[in-house]
Image (cartoon, helix red, strand yellow):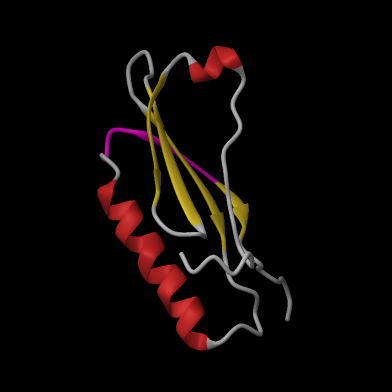
Amino acid sequence: MDGSGLAGVGIIMTPKIASGFLDYEALSDRIVMAHLKGQSNNLTILSVYAPIRDAPDYLKDKFYADLQLTLNKIPRKDILVIGGNLNARIGT
């Protein structure tokens, strides 16, 4: 994290949801992960903010490499929810 203030993500939870909170990890200024205790399976929530289309390729490559490393850390039995701004465009 370079402190430039150009990116940033977070996860907001209600008190009821937060009661199952296990841990939280800021993997970069663009990716955060929270783990919640579930009844049969745990829940992993990712909040992501992808670089814009015009960003330098090295930033986009780093983001997607970091995202893949993050996904590789998640237990396969967890329920995964990904939310965020992926700066995707349809039909362009």
Span shown in magenta: 76-82
Does residue 25 appear to the left or right of 50 in the view shown?
A: left
Residue projecting furthest to the right: 91
Residue 3 screen position, x and y as percent: 54, 65
- Asked if residue 92 lies in the magenta stretch, the reply is no
| Residue appearing at x 52%, y 59% in the figure | 30
Does residue 50 appear to the left or right of 74 in the view shown?
A: right
Quadrant housing residue 50 = bottom right
In front of the other: 79 or 63 = 63
- How many numbered badges does the structure rendering display? 0
Quadrant housing residue 7 = bottom right
| Residue appearing at x 43%, y 69% in the figure | 64
- Above or below: residue 39 compared with residue 45: above
Residue 39 screen position, x and y as percent: 37, 13
- Indicate the quadrant containing the C terminus: top left, top right, bottom left or bottom right: bottom right
Residue 68 screen position, x and y as percent: 35, 62
| Residue appearing at x 43%, y 43% in the figure | 33
Residue projecting furthest to the front: 3
Quadrant housing residue 40 = top left
- Above or below: residue 92 compared with residue 71: below
Does residue 15 appear to the left or right of 90 in the view shown?
A: left
| Residue appearing at x 62%, y 20% in the figure | 14
In front of the other: 28 or 39 = 28
Residue 59 screen position, x and y as percent: 49, 79
